[in-house]
Image: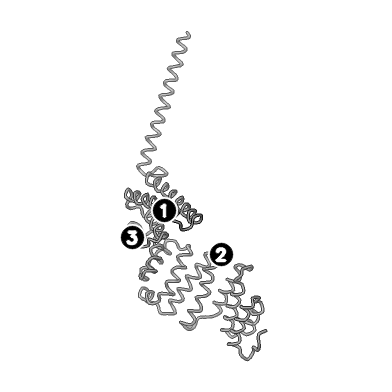
Amino acid sequence: MARGGTYRSHTVWSWKRFFISLSFVLAIASATLWWHSGRFPYSPEEVRFRLLMVQYVQTKAQLDQIYMQAGSSSVSEFNMNRRINRLCKSFETFLIRYPSHDQAMNVYGSFLDEIGKGEDAVQWWERAVEFSRRNPQLLNNLANYYGHNGRAEDAIKLYEEAIKIEPDEPIYHFNLGNMYYLFRKETNAIHGWNLRKTFEHSLLHFRIARDLAPENSEYAISYAETYYGVKFLSKGFEWRDAEDAWKFCLSMDPQSNYQDSIRVHLVRINSYQGNSAIALDWYGQIKSPGSRQLSWQIMKRFFPDETGSEI
């Protein structure tokens, strides 16, 4: 009986092991099929790309740490170059395996640009664009390079493409506003706009950038400052819009050290409009002696009969 009981128990356990093993094999086989058919959550290509991005982030952190701790010594330069070369080799190995991976090309180009290899970077960005024009960051990166290297028309077109894909990204609007403002001839060649129309579109994109990122002082100040150039290059723009833009800057951070310099702008804008009482009111809120003196000189030029010696 004991033997019979032991034998039956062993038989049952053998069948259990068989079914467990079979289930495991089937699970592995199914996962393999999903993996290679692209239905698995992460394909081999995606897994390798994610690992590459981990190395990319780690290397950038290491480079920053080496630079902060050791400065520009020969030892730190050797360590930095070693890590840079290792990361570059990883990117290029990956791109040999996956030669149409536009996202990897974009990131690699950005890294090369950061380390001062802009010409190498643009080659990867241009190659990536051949495979995909649906990556707005890629288009923006390439446009940045073109804009700084004599290809303004190409830059404008790429920024416009990036905005169509991702209209809520403020940096694309900010960059396009700058291009319209600085490269009026090239903008006219693309769109046929006259000077006023060009400035209207420039201001529009500056304002969109500011409104999409209302905490970004660079966008707000750039939008407000643009009115000066617009006014002197094209007649008919209202200073009231510029005044509102500077008031927005003033409201961003009441404790900022730039408050007095913004009030100087409000004195100037109201002086341009002939509002002596409002200009004087803004002048009265300025605390810095240097800013007060500058504001008084502005008002004295516009309202010589209403200003005597500085108050």
- Asked if the residue under mark 2 is in contact with the one under mark 3, i.e. CB atoms within 8 Å, the reply is no
In the rendered image, which quarter is residue 180 located in? bottom left
- Residue at x-position 45% and y-position 76%: 199
SS of the residue under disc 3: helix
- Residue at x-position 64% and y-position 67%: 255
Is 200 situated above or below 130? below
Q: Which residue is mark 3?
A: 123
Labels 3 and 2: the sequence-earlier one:
3
Residue 268 % position (x, y): 57, 81
In the rendered image, which quarter is residue 253 located in? bottom right
Label 1 crowd (10 A; few <14 / some 14-19 / many >=20): few
Q: Amino acid at mark 1?
A: Phe
Label 3 crowd (10 A; few <14 / some 14-19 / many >=20): few
Q: Residue furthest front?
A: 74
Q: Which residue is mark 2?
A: 215
**Whole-Å distance between the Cαs marked 3 and 1?**
26 Å
Labels 3 and 1: the sequence-earlier one:
1
Is 266 situated above or below 45? below
SS of the residue under disc 2: loop
Which colour scheme appears in the figure?
Answer: one colour
Residue 87 % position (x, y): 39, 51
Q: Amino acid at mark 2?
A: Glu
Labels 2 and 1: the sequence-earlier one:
1
Q: Which residue is mark 1?
A: 78
Is 84 situated above or below 211? above
